[in-house]
Image: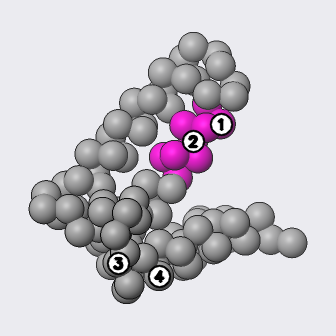
Amino acid sequence: MSNTVILDEINAVIDERSRNPGPGSYVSGLLNDEKGIDRVLEKIAEEAGEFIIAVKNGVPERTVAEAADLQFHLLVALKAADIPFEDVLKELKNRRT
């Protein structure tokens, strides 16, 4: 099984919530916030700060949780910027060759 399967699944949910916004959907709320993409970028800044603090404090379980939050919000930001997640994967692959 590919290590990106869960990221693909989460990205598919983000895609679905983007196309079919629903009341109470966190993703829909972020993508349709009156601040626009700034709202998602604020969340990335917040989660990045929390990740840094968790790493600095040496708390593995918090580091993992904050890394997951940061990755999730990065996927939402890519959607808001209309950049396919696959493009990021391709770029990473190109850097390996």
Say whether residue 68 is left or right of residue 76.
right
Residue at image point 57% right, 14% down: 57
Mark closest to the chain's N terminus, 4 or 2: 4
Q: CA distance from mark 2 to mark 1?
A: 5 Å
Tell me: residue 58, above or below residue 60.
above
Residue at image point 80% right, 71% down: 2
Residue assigned mark 1: 64
Residue assigned mark 3: 21
Q: Is the magenta region chiefly helix, strand or loop?
A: helix
Element under disc 3: loop
Residue 78 magenta-highlighted: no
Query: Farthest right residue?
Result: 1
C-beta proximity under 8 Å, tags 2 and 3: no
Mark closest to the chain's N terminus, 4 or 3: 4
Amino acid found under the numbered disc labelled 2: Ala
Residue assigned mark 4: 16
Q: Which residues are magenta?
A: 63-71
Residue assigned mark 2: 67
Amino acid found under the numbered disc labelled 4: Glu
Q: CA distance from mark 1 to mark 4?
A: 26 Å
Q: CA distance from mark 4 to mark 3?
A: 8 Å
User: Disc 1 vs disc 4: which is toward the camera?
Assistant: 4
User: Disc 4 vs disc 2: which is toward the camera?
Assistant: 4
Q: Quadrant of residue 97?
A: bottom right
C-beta proximity under 8 Å, tags 1 and 4: no
Amino acid found under the numbered disc labelled 1: Val
